[in-house]
């Protein structure tokens, strides 16, 4: 039986008896991501997921909470902040991250591996503009990896707030968007890491052709 505390866990691993009668993975209920039919072994924000998709979603959710926590504790730093009332609190605030279990920390290697495993690269699914920017980043513009990972963090924050308020219907709607964002993040991470160089090369050639065409249009105008 699921306890009240377990119902409120952002990342919850199902007991064996719950797995046996559990629901299939929820990932892929939207229009952009292929439906996953594997059995669920965990829940992230109440959404049932298989081990592979669950690890990716868990990484995103845990990372978002770490970022949010870091921002919270930084409010006690700097000349404009209210100083803690005593040295004990100051020490606790400065060492807050040490209280986080290692399993809940998400180094970039774990994060990237989870993304790539959950959403293997498919050229047809990759957003053309993002691939173009991976091939030839525009100076002064946010890199596609940073853009999609930031969007992934933001939607995890929204889902966490919805989960904390018991808005299950909203979480299910948001999951469709989270899947799509995570898939795009996985695509640009794979390309930036040097996977599928032929895709990047095609995009680079297309960028060059577009630039030549644009220059011709300006000259004709």
Image (tube, rainbow, N blue to C red):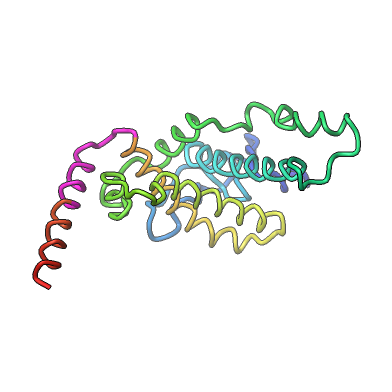
Confirm whether residue 118 shows in the render. yes
26 relative to 95, above or below:
below
Furthest residue in direction bottom, as rendered: 221
Secondary structure character of the magenta stretch overall: helix
Asked whether residue 52 is drawn in magenta, I would say no
Q: Quadrant of the C terminus?
A: bottom left
The residue lying at 57 percent from left, 33 percent from top is 106
- Total marks drawn? 0
Q: Quadrant of residue 165?
A: bottom right
Residue 18 percent location from the top left of the image? 63, 41
The residue lying at 69 percent from left, 42 percent from top is 69
64 relative to 30, above or below:
above
Residue 1 percent location from the top left of the image? 73, 43
Residue 94 lies left or right of residue 47; in this view the side is right
Residue 113 lies left or right of residue 201; in this view the side is right
The residue lying at 63 percent from left, 37 percent from top is 13
Residue 65 lies left or right of residue 32; in this view the side is right
Name the residue nearer the viewer: 37 or 138: 138
Confirm whether residue 1 shows in the render. no
Furthest residue in direction right, as rendered: 86
Residue 64 percent location from the top left of the image? 60, 44
Name the residue nearer the viewer: 50 or 210: 210
Name the residue nearer the viewer: 116 or 219: 219
Residue 131 percent location from the top left of the image? 29, 48
- Highlighted magenta segment, given as a residue range: 193-207
The residue lying at 41 percent from left, 44 percent from top is 145
């Amino acid at each position: 039986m699921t306890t009240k505390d377990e119902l409120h866990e952002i990342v919850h691993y199902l007991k064996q008896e719950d797995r046996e009668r559990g629901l299939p993975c929820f990932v892929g209920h939207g229009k952009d991501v292929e439906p996953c039919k594997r059995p669920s072994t965990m829940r992230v924000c109440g959404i049932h997921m298989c081990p592979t998709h669950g690890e990716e979603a868990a990484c995103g959710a845990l990372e978002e909470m770490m970022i949010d926590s870091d921002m919270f504790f930084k409010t006690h730093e700097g000349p404009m902040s209210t100083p803690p009332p005593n040295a004990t609190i100051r020490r606790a605030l400065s060492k807050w991250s040490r209280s986080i279990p290692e399993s809940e920390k998400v180094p970039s290697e774990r994060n990237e591996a989870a993304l790539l495993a959950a959403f293997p690269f498919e050229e047809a699914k990759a957003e053309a503009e993002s691939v173009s920017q991976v091939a030839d980043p525009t100076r002064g513009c946010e890199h596609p990896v940073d853009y999609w990972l930031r969007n992934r963090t933001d939607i995890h924050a929204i889902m966490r707030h919805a989960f904390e308020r018991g808005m299950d219907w909203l979480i299910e709607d948001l999951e469709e968007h989270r899947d799509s964002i995570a898939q795009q993040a996985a695509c640009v991470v794979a390309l930036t890491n040097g996977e599928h160089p032929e895709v990047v090369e095609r995009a680079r050639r297309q960028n060059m052709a577009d630039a030549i065409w644009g220059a011709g249009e300006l000259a004709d105008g």
